[in-house]
Image: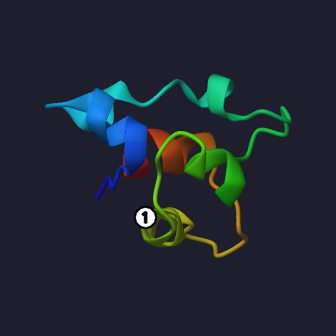
Amino acid sequence: MLALSGAAAAASGSGEADQLPKFSAVDQDGNSKLSLEEAKAVGVEKETFKEEDLDDDGKLTKYDYKYGVK
């Protein structure tokens, strides 16, 4: 389900999902949810974000990130 782009994909090699930073490092504003912009900053593509945004609120929870994206 993970789709990386740009430098994140180049740096990841094999096991790319395990290379994503921890949720707390990605959640730049500290609101306990990831915006599309925060997720894209670490290489999560828009399509992956939308697939994992299960309640369609435009945010990913820690659970969505850990078990869906990561």
Q: Name the residue under label 1.
A: 48
Q: Position of residue 6 (x, y in %)?
A: 40, 47
Residue at the outermost bottom position: 56
Give the colour scheme shown: rainbow
- Number of numbered discs overlaid on the protein picture: 1
Residue at image point 31% right, 41% down: 9
Q: Position of residue 12 (x, y in %)?
A: 27, 30
Residue 4 or 29: which is nearer the viewer? 4
Q: Where is residue 65 in the image (x, y as percent from the top left)?
A: 50, 45
Q: Which image quadrant is residue 23 in?
A: top right
Q: Which amino acid does label 1 sit on?
A: Thr
Residue at the outermost left position: 14
Query: In this rendering, is residue 36 above or below 56?
Result: above
Any part of residue 70 in sight:
no
Quadrant where the C terminus is found in the figure: top left
Query: In this rendering, is residue 44 above or below 46?
Result: above
Residue at image point 36% right, 49% down: 4
Any part of residue 58 in sight:
yes
Query: In this rendering, is residue 42 above or below 5?
Result: above
Q: Where is residue 61 in the image (x, y as percent from the top left)?
A: 64, 48
Horizontal arrangement in the rendering, residue 11 relative to residue 37 (left or right)? left
Q: What element carries label 1?
A: helix
Residue at image point 78% right, 33% down: 28
Quadrant where the N terminus is found in the figure: bottom left
Q: Residues within 10 Å of mark 1 (few under 14, many from 20)?
A: some
Horizontal arrangement in the rendering, residue 6 relative to residue 27 (left or right)? left
Horizontal arrangement in the rendering, residue 14 relative to residue 69 (left or right)? left
